[in-house]
Amino acid sequence: MSDNQNSESSRIYSLFYSFFLIPLMMVVFGILFYLLFSVLTDEPTDINQLLLKLETGSMRDKSNASYRINKLFSDIPNSIC
């Protein structure tokens, strides 16, 4: 009887791990990886942040910021001017 009960308990644990805990861990690690990747590759899109990069950034940051500012202003329709 005890052997049968251990077998059932073992089956319940294996079902719990394979259908709940392992997929949950995969989702959590996927979300953490996505958040880490988005933080590492975050680029400023606000004009004030870009102007700050133009003033204080490295040469690469300055060229990237000037390109983005140029792109922002070239997307403005000509009817405003």
Image: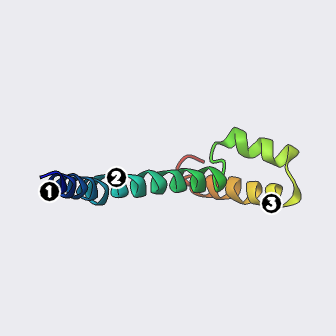
Q: Which mark sits nearer the N-terminus, 2 or 1?
A: 1
Q: Residue furthest left?
A: 1
Helix, strand or loop at mark 2: helix
Helix, strand or loop at mark 3: helix
Q: CA distance from mark 1 to mark 3?
A: 71 Å
Q: Residue at x 85, y 49 (%)?
A: 57
Q: Residue at x 75, y 59 (%)?
A: 64
| Disc 2 residue type (three-letter) | Leu
What residue did someone put label 3 on? 63
The reply to whether the C-beta atoms of the residues labelled 2 and 1 are less than 8 Å apart is no
Q: Which mark sits nearer the N-terminus, 2 or 3?
A: 2
| Disc 1 residue type (three-letter) | Asn
**Image coordinates for residue 4, horizontal then vertical, percent:** 14, 56
What residue did someone put label 1 on? 4
Q: Nearer the viewer, mark 2 or mark 1?
A: 1
How is the model colour-coded? rainbow
